[in-house]
Amino acid sequence: EYILETLELSDPRSLMQYLAYQDLCAVSECNLEPWRRAAFFEESGETYKRIVTACLKPLEEFTSKIAEALEGFSSEKPELLSQQFKLAAAFNDSQICTWCARTLSSLTARSRQEDRYGVAQLTGCNAAVMSTLLSALVAVEACLGKKTNPQPAHSLGPASIKWANFSTGRKGNVTAIASTQRGGLHTKAFSMADVIRTSIYQMVSAFEHDMRANAKASSLEKNWISEGRKPVFGSQAVLVQKLSLFIEYRAV
């Protein structure tokens, strides 16, 4: 309860907030104090929903900032510099986003064995977590030059990746924004993409059998992508296609 109150009431970017997110991540990932994590899965589901909401918020804000920076990207120098600054600023909270992604993926994966009441699935948290992480990954990959629109099946996989040096994007057709030179934004984007990708694979590994069955029955979107809720970045079709790649262990 103290962690939740700190996350919900502390000032953004304050030391108390940082420590609370770090502690929550440790409890979610480690077995040193399993009784604390067990309390997350209490019968009403309210505690679990509060934890998930507290962790989804920074990730959604992070994705929203990237989307805003990429929107209508211009090649005009004054505007270009301003938009580049916005894009770089989106990664200022990357440490908190890292802890949030790791917390959400660990709790979702552990719910497979530890959630006696099924609150993670019944409250819609699993779908919300997966949708948010997929949307964030698509946004980060857009910064690194990956296409964000649905691709034909034959063009999916590692061989289809094409990185760009530096280019601009137009509204509705985002292409590479970040420089591929060492350091700065490129390094942060690559690091965050790796964190999110690893988090998604952790969930896929825990629920692989169920996800494969859902994919075969064409119900993947219904059970693992938030219905009736527009993704912060990307489209429902893109997220479903992305998740399918993870299930086949072809997302890189």
Image: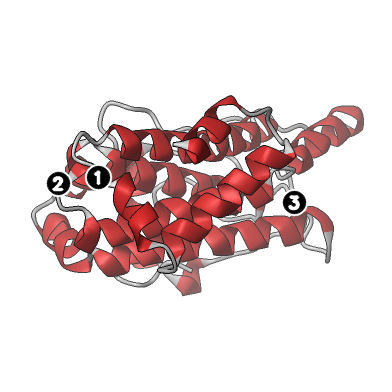
Residue 140 horizontal side relative to residue 218, left or right? right
Q: Nearer the viewer, residue 95 or 45?
A: 45
Q: Is residue 201 left or right of residue 102?
A: left
Q: Which residue is mark 2?
A: 117
Give coordinates of residue 170: x percent, y percent.
64, 34
- Regarding mark 2 in the picture, which secondary structure is present there? loop
Q: Residue at x 30, y 64 (%)?
A: 204
Q: In x, y percent, where is residue 161? A: 54, 66
Q: Is residue 227 visible?
A: yes
Label 2 is placed on what type of residue? Tyr
Residue furthest left as drawn: 217
**Amino acid on which the number 3 mark rests in the picture:** Ala
Q: Residue at x 57, y 37 (%)?
A: 58
Residue 189: x, y in percent?
A: 67, 55
User: Crowding at label 1, few (<14), some or many (≥20) Cα neighbours within 10 Å?
Assistant: many
Tell me the number on the disc at residue 120: 1
Where is mark 3, residue-wise?
Answer: 178
State the CA–CA distance, disc 2 to disc 1. 8 Å
In primary-sequence order, the first of circles 3 and 2 is 2
C-alpha separation, residue under disc 3 versus residue under disc 2? 44 Å
Q: Which mark is nearer the camera, 1 or 3?
A: 1
Residue at image coords 87%, 35% = 81
